[in-house]
Image: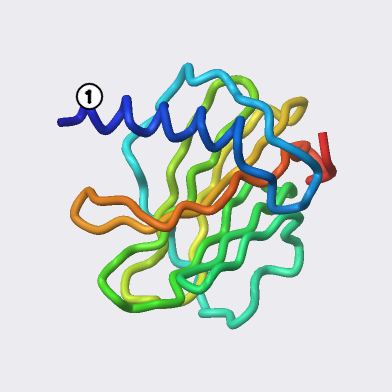
């Protein structure tokens, strides 16, 4: 089952990367190498005091009916929150153009913004997309964002 899910994820990633328009309208996203599936999925840590809006230092955002995520270049932080306490958890798939794939889940029960901290290569690029997951089932994938510089958040 794990192999099937991994294969499905790689196929969906390839299809999404070559066929879906990016959120920013910058064109079709280029496929990144699927080298490292990374560590197990991790749930975001609490942002401390719950905040109502995305952190102001975020460079790239996705907002959909079930959740929001944004990338903060300064600190390599991926912020995420679940907006719909329906039993499905909002997730963000973060991908680098040097083969890293990371997954950050929102805090449970739509409890506000949380963050996952990464140590991306500052000379490379990152992109991400959101989806929902419940009991191993995934749905509602967004398009990939365009590639953005890890160091500044500007387009690559």
Quick check: 93 above or below 4?
below
Residue 87: x and y in percent read 25, 71
Q: Quadrant of the N terminus?
A: top left
Scheme of image coloration:
rainbow
Task: Say which quadrant the C terminus sits in.
Answer: top right
Q: Position of residue 97 (x, y in %)?
A: 64, 25
Residue drawn at x 79%, y 46% is: 153
Q: Residue at x 54, y 41 (%)?
A: 94
- The one of 63 and 149 positioned closer to us in this rendering: 63
Q: Secondary structure at mark 1?
A: helix
| Image vertical order of residue 104 relative to residue 121, above or below | below
| Residue under label 1 | 3
Q: Is residue 16 left or right of residue 55?
A: left
Q: Position of residue 101 (x, y in %)?
A: 48, 32
Q: Residue at x 61, y 50 (%)?
A: 77
Q: x and y percent of residue 91 in the render?
A: 42, 55
Horizontal arrangement in the rendering, residue 152 relative to residue 87 (left or right) = right
Judge by depth and name the residue closer to the eye, 55 or 29. Answer: 29
Numbered-mark total: 1
Up-down relation of residue 104 to residue 113 (above or below) = above
Foreground of the two, 45 or 30: 30
Name the foreground residue: 110 vs 116.
Answer: 110
């Amino acid at each position: 089952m794990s192999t099937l899910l991994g294969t499905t994820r790689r196929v969906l990633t390839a299809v999404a990367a070559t066929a879906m328009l990016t959120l920013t309208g910058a064109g079709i996203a280029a496929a990144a190498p699927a080298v490292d599936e990374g560590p197990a999925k991790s749930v975001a840590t609490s942002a401390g005091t719950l905040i109502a809006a995305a952190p102001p230092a975020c460079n790239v955002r996705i907002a959909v009916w079930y959740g929001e995520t944004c990338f903060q270049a300064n600190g390599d932080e991926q912020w995420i929150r679940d907006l719909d306490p329906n039993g499905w958890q909002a997730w963000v798939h973060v991908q680098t153009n040097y083969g890293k794939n990371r997954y950050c889940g929102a805090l449970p029960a739509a409890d506000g913004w949380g963050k996952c901290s990464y140590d991306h290569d500052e000379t490379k690029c990152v992109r991400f997309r959101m989806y929902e997951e419940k009991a191993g089932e995934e749905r509602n994938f967004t398009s990939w964002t365009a590639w953005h510089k890890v160091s500044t958040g500007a387009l690559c």
